[in-house]
Amino acid sequence: MKKKLSTLLITSLSIFSCYCCAQTNPASNKVNTVQPKIMVIPYTKEGEDIRTVLEADVNRRVAVTKVKESFDNRNFTTVDFTAKLKSAMDDQLFTSTSLTDLKTQLVEMSGADIYVEVEVPPMVATGGGNSARLILTGYDASTANSLSNKVCESPKFFTSDYGALVTKALGTCSEEFLNTMQVKFSDIVENGRSVKINFTLAQGSKYKFSTELQPEGLPFSDVLEAWMSDNSLKNNYHIQGTTDLKMLFDDVRIPLKDEKGRNYNPNQFALKIFQFLKTKGMSSAKEIKNGTIFITIK
């Protein structure tokens, strides 16, 4: 009995330390091992430029580096934020002047599955010593849905070595942060990413969501729901509401990987919707923003 318990404990720890998740390929019934790529980036306030923020603050550079090291030490696959940013700037890949869009573009270019924002409040100095505080927030890179968040604070020490204080702060919360992120990412692997899909009608459209479509002879909203049932992962979707002019799915699950094991994202699902509507003789426009797919039917 003791031997079985020991074996079980070792297996559980191995799964946690590697942070590997499995996804079944429906076509082959084979299990694909999925290890997420993680990029650690600095938190930026409104008006701050992510391209220059680390150059202006050594404490942020230290914090981002230490958090990345903590993932590396646990055998996570990480993407180097500084190297990816420099490469994007050298190749002039940024196509927008919007600071918010720049961050979104960088995350998309990185190929990361998860990005972790590190916010660095000022060091706390008291008569009893100094301490560092970090605010960590992990996001699904494709949808920007939050996966984990934690405030980490180091014990007080009589030192001004910020790197040492950051390391101590991470030691107080990193395991819990990673554990929560693991649970959420495992759910994504097993049950899919959650996206919202907002269907609206363009001004002057000849369609309404009550319009009967052929050959089904059913209202457009019912035909659309039947398609969503067939194409969402494991028939997992939820309708928030339907009117003659709008239809909102507030939780549709799409797979992390496609049938060939390649990354699958909301834009690819939006393309499937676009192609389906085309089979019904409908022209549409699509837009994806922060995990929401906007479909406008003309």
Image (tube, helix red, strand yellow):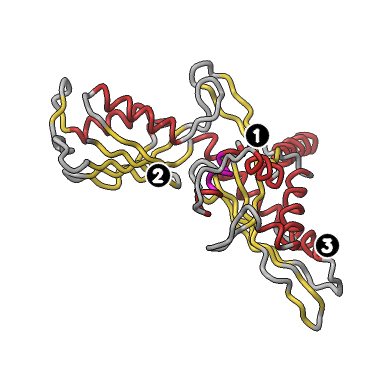
Q: Quadrant of the C terminus?
A: top left
**Mark 1 = which residue?**
35
**Mark 2 = which residue?**
292
Give the magenta range: 103-108
Question: 54 or 183, which lies in front?
Answer: 54
Can you name the residue that lies furthest to the bottom here? 127
Can you name the residue that lies furthest to the right here? 158
Question: 280 or 205, which lies in front?
Answer: 205
Find residue 79 and report its image quarter: top right
N-terminal-most mark, 1 or 3: 1
Amino acid type assigned to the residue bearing label 1 in the image: Gln
Question: 62 or 10, which lies in front?
Answer: 62
For marks 1 and 3, give the CA distance: 29 Å
- Residue located at (35% from left, 46% from top): 250
Amino acid type assigned to the residue bearing label 2 in the image: Thr
**Mark 3 = which residue?**
164
Label 3, secondary structure: give it: helix
- Residue located at (40% from left, 44% from top): 292
80 over 256 or under it: above or below: below
User: What x and y, as percent, mark residue 175?
Assistant: 71, 52
Label 1, secondary structure: give it: loop
In the image, taking residue 182 as reference, residue 228 lies left or right, namely left
In the image, taking residue 198 as reference, residue 93 lies left or right, namely right
Reply yes or no: does residue 68 show up in magenta.
no
In the image, taking residue 58 as reference, residue 293 lies left or right, namely left
N-terminal-most mark, 2 or 3: 3
Number of numbered markers: 3
Find residue 112 and report its image quarter: top right
> Which tag is nearer the camera, tag 1 or tag 2?
2
User: What x and y, as percent, mark residue 264?
Assistant: 50, 30
Label 2, secondary structure: give it: strand
N-terminal-most mark, 1 or 2: 1
